[in-house]
Image (tube, helix red, strand yellow):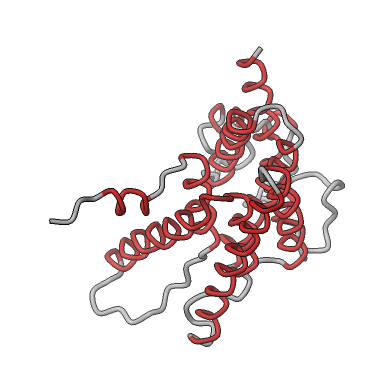
C-alpha cells in the first residue's frame, strides 16, 4: 500500500511538473495555459501526445525532438524527476494528513517560481503571491500549536527582512526584492528548520557562484546574473527533509 502511494505521488508530481513547464513557458506570451498544442521550440512542429509523456518520452527519444532531431534541454525531465521525488518525500514526512495537499501545492508553485527564475531572472508577482499564501496555510497546518506557528512567522519575517535589507543596501545588485517574500514562504514550509535552511541557501549559492567564476575566461569583467531562487529553494528543502542542523553541530563541538 505504501509503495503504491509512493508510485502514485511520483507520477502525479511528474505530470504536474510537465504542466508547470508549459505554464512557465507561456506566462506573459498571450497563450492560454489549457488551450493550444505544445510545439517544438526549434521547428515549431506540433508535438504528439506520445512525445509529451513525462520522463519516459525524453528517455525514449534520447533527448532529441522526433520532428527535427534538435536536442532537448534536460531541465524538463529533471524538474519532473525532482517534483515527483519531492511529492514522495512530503508523503513520507507528513503522512496522509490535511497538511499534505497544502505542502504538495506549495512545492508545485515553488517549482514554477524556480523555473521562471531560471529563464528570466525574475519572479512573477502572481505566482509568488500564490506560493506565499499556500506556504502560510501549509505552515499553519504542520505547526504543532499556535505558539509554534507564531514563532515560525516571526522567524520567517526576520529572514525576509534580512534579504530585503541586502537588496536595498546593494541597490538591487546583490539580489532581487522578490527573493524576500520567497524566503518568507520557504521559512514557513521549513518550520523549525528555517534558520538552517537559510544558512544552507547561502552555502549552496556560494559554492555554485565560485564554480561559475572559476569557469569564466581569465581577465573577463562581464557580470554574470545568477538566479537566487533555486538556491533558496534547495537550502530550505534540504533543511526541512533532512532536519540537519549545523547549529547543533557547532554547539556540541568541545572547546579546548
Q: Position of residue 2 (x, y in %)?
A: 63, 16
Vertical comparison of 50 with 25: above or below: above
Q: Quadrant of residue 203?
A: bottom left
Residue closest to the eye, 71 or 129: 129
Vertical comparison of 80 with 114: above or below: above
Question: Residue at point 62% right, 50% down?
Answer: 189
Q: Residue furthest left?
A: 256
Q: Is residue 217 left or right of residue 194?
A: left
Q: Position of residue 92 (x, y in %)?
A: 59, 28
Q: Residue furthest top?
A: 1
Quarter of the image for the N terminus: give it: top right
Quarter of the image for the C terminus: give it: bottom left
Q: Is residue 208 left or right of residue 72?
A: left
Question: Residue at point 58% right, 37% down?
Answer: 86
Question: Residue at point 72% right, 49% down?
Answer: 140
Q: Position of residue 147 (x, y in %)?
A: 67, 53
Question: Residue at point 65% right, 61% down?
Answer: 153
Q: How many marks?
A: 0
Q: Position of residue 131 (x, y in %)?
A: 71, 56
Q: Quadrant of residue 54?
A: top right
Vertical comparison of 139 with 58: above or below: below
Amino acid at each position: 500500500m505504501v509503495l503504491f502511494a509512493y508510485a502514485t505521488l511520483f507520477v502525479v508530481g511528474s505530470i504536474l511538473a510537465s504542466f508547470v513547464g508549459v505554464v512557465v513557458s507561456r506566462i506573459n506570451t498571450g497563450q492560454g495555459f489549457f488551450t493550444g498544442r505544445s510545439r517544438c521550440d526549434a521547428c515549431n512542429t506540433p508535438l504528439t501526445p506520445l512525445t509529451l509523456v513525462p520522463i519516459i518520452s525524453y528517455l525514449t527519444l534520447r533527448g532529441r525532438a522526433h520532428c527535427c532531431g534538435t536536442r532537448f534541454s534536460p531541465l524538463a525531465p529533471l524538474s519532473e524527476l525532482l517534483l515527483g521525488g519531492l511529492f514522495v518525500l512530503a508523503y513520507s514526512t507528513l503522512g496522509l494528513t490535511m497538511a499534505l495537499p497544502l505542502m504538495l501545492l506549495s512545492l508545485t508553485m515553488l517549482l514554477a517560481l524556480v523555473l521562471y527564475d531560471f529563464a528570466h531572472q525574475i519572479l512573477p508577482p502572481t505566482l509568488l503571491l500564490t506560493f506565499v499564501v499556500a506556504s502560510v496555510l501549509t505552515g499553519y497546518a504542520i505547526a504543532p500549536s499556535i505558539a509554534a506557528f507564531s514563532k515560525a512567522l516571526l522567524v520567517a519575517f526576520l529572514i525576509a527582512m534580512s534579504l530585503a535589507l541586502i537588496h536595498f543596501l546593494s541597490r538591487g545588485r546583490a539580489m532581487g526584492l522578490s527573493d524576500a517574500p520567497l524566503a518568507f514562504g520557504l521559512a514557513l514550509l521549513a518550520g523549525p528548520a528555517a534558520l538552517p535552511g537559510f544558512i544552507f541557501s547561502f552555502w549552496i549559492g556560494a559554492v555554485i557562484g565560485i564554480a561559475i567564476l572559476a569557469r569564466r575566461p581569465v581577465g573577463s569583467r562581464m557580470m554574470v546574473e545568477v538566479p537566487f531562487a533555486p538556491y533558496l529553494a534547495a537550502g530550505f528543502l534540504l533543511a526541512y527533509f533532512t532536519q540537519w542542523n549545523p547549529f547543533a553541530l557547532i554547539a556540541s563541538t568541545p572547546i579546548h
